[in-house]
Amino acid sequence: MKKIIVLIAVFTGLFFTSCEDELDQDNPNKLTTEQYWKSEGDAQAGVNSIYAMFYKDGLWARWIYFRLDLTSDEGYSNSPWVELADWTRFNYINYNFWEGNVVTWRDTYKAIFRCNQVIANVPNITFQNEDDKKKIIAQAKFLRALHYYYAAVLWENIPIVLEPSKPTDTPEQKNVTEVYAQIEKDLNEAFADLPESWTGEQLGRPDKGAAKAFLAKLYMQQHKWNEAKGALDYLIAGPGAKYNLVSNYRDNFTDANENNSESVFEIQFGDQRKGGTDESQSAAVSSNRAQFFAPRSIGWSDGQARFWLVNAFKEEKNQAGNLDIRLRYTLFYPQLEADFGDKTYGKNWEWGNDEAWFRKGSRDYYRNNEDYYSQVNYRLVRYADILLRYAEVLNELGNTADAYQYVDLVRARVNLKTLAAAHPEIGNDHDKFLERLKTERVLELAGESVRWEDLKRWGDLDSQAAVDKIALRDPDFKNFKVGKNQRLPIPQTEADNNPFLEQHPEY
């Protein structure tokens, strides 16, 4: 899908003219909505512009990782930018803080606006092949569902906008259950018209498997275990069972083996343009994550990992008596060279004994520094996550005995004993299995932006006793207020300017 990257800028000017209708003046240098949406090329450029939103500051270029990774118990910020660090400590003072809140809200709804443009206008365009039209609309529905999903995880009760909007619109706030219902509708409709796979230059666009994966995530967040099992069945034993774990764990986190057999859906990044994150032809299509999460003297070091993760990896050695290889490729930490012989970025580090940084997505395997233009794709969903989710669903449905095999597939890749052999105390006990699965998920998926939704799904943010347990490994949770901080405050400017949008009452 790297070819999509070079096309996305063509369409972006349209979005500004569509917001100027009330001036009743046409800019002769820009297309209006009425002048556009005439050809298949217009439709293709339109859907490509939705992918461009992955490269914006508020979303997967930069700031969303602060919300999903650093706010969870896996990470934190020790940035000298105090307000930025405070937004990973649940110290929300200024609800209009741009980097912590507003820019992610803005870019989320900007992405949704682009989806709505495609969904509303492409049906009126004549295509030589009707299936091509259906695929474009299906992509827009999938991407709209994706952005609403993460918005629901972060803010919960939000407006649902399903038509191309105008600056004067004041969309009504909906309960998170209604948001989930819309996401489900979009994903099911997308699934019907998405292909089973893409090839060539189109590789990386969402397919039927990606739609089912997000349906599974959606159902699990609502504890709809039977529905979640149905979605996961498609990926594991049904028509979509095309995935496999790659033999080399690190192949999931470099640019050397992207869109591999383990990838269910990944964001396509590139380093061919060195611009900013604006709408210009030279706008970057890169990830800033490695730059902001890199160790000191390599990048900004505004985000790092909690050291309890290192200890978790070291609790169990593999069948050869060695450390879990996933530790090597998940974290930078003081003993990394002693444990695995790695001198990362070609440096001898002087780290504090309790310091760690996220390694996944770093480029230390071929360069000595990071910058704003990482080309490493971000694997948003991979098959190991699907297998562990299937085990969780089976356990919730009372079929703990069958759940073991799916955890064992993930453990076998890194030469660990079967779960039953390593932890015979679990047996068929639902609660003990779930507690162990929480650890299995963090060992496999740490730093991959799933932990926050996991904590919410497990109910670990719903009681003071559960939060106190988290605070033992992440002191930031001493600031966490039960019934409040499980969701972000709505940007105050949005609440002030829209009479149908209320700030969450706990804020």
Image (tube, rainbow, N blue to C red):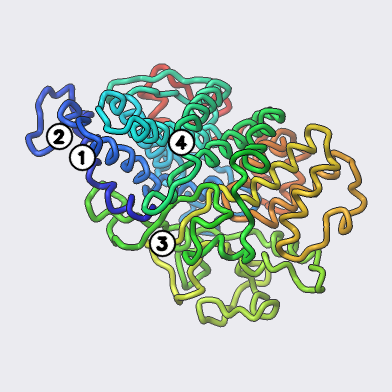
Query: Label 1: which residue?
Result: 13
Labels 1 and 2 touching (C-beta < 8 A): yes
Residue projecting furthest to the left: 28
The 10 Å Cα crowd at callout 2, few under 14, some 14 to 19, many 20 or more, is some
The image's mark for residue 375 is 3
Query: Label 2: which residue?
Result: 31
**In this picture, residue 47 sits left or right of residue 457:** left
Task: Pick whichever, 155 or 365, lies toward us.
Answer: 365
Q: Position of residue 120 (x, y in %)?
A: 32, 24
The 10 Å Cα crowd at callout 3, few under 14, some 14 to 19, many 20 or more, is some
Quadrant containing the C terminus in the rendered view = top right
The residues tagged by marks 2 and 3 sit, at their Cα atoms, a distance apart of 32 Å
Residue 487 in the image: above or below residue 452: above
Which mark is first along the chain, 3 or 2? 2
Looking at the rendered image, the disc whose residue lies closer to the viewer, 4 or 2, is: 4
Labels 4 and 2 touching (C-beta < 8 A): no
The residues tagged by marks 1 and 2 sit, at their Cα atoms, a distance apart of 8 Å
The image's mark for residue 194 is 4
Labels 4 and 3 touching (C-beta < 8 A): no
The residues tagged by marks 1 and 4 sit, at their Cα atoms, a distance apart of 28 Å
Labels 2 and 3 touching (C-beta < 8 A): no
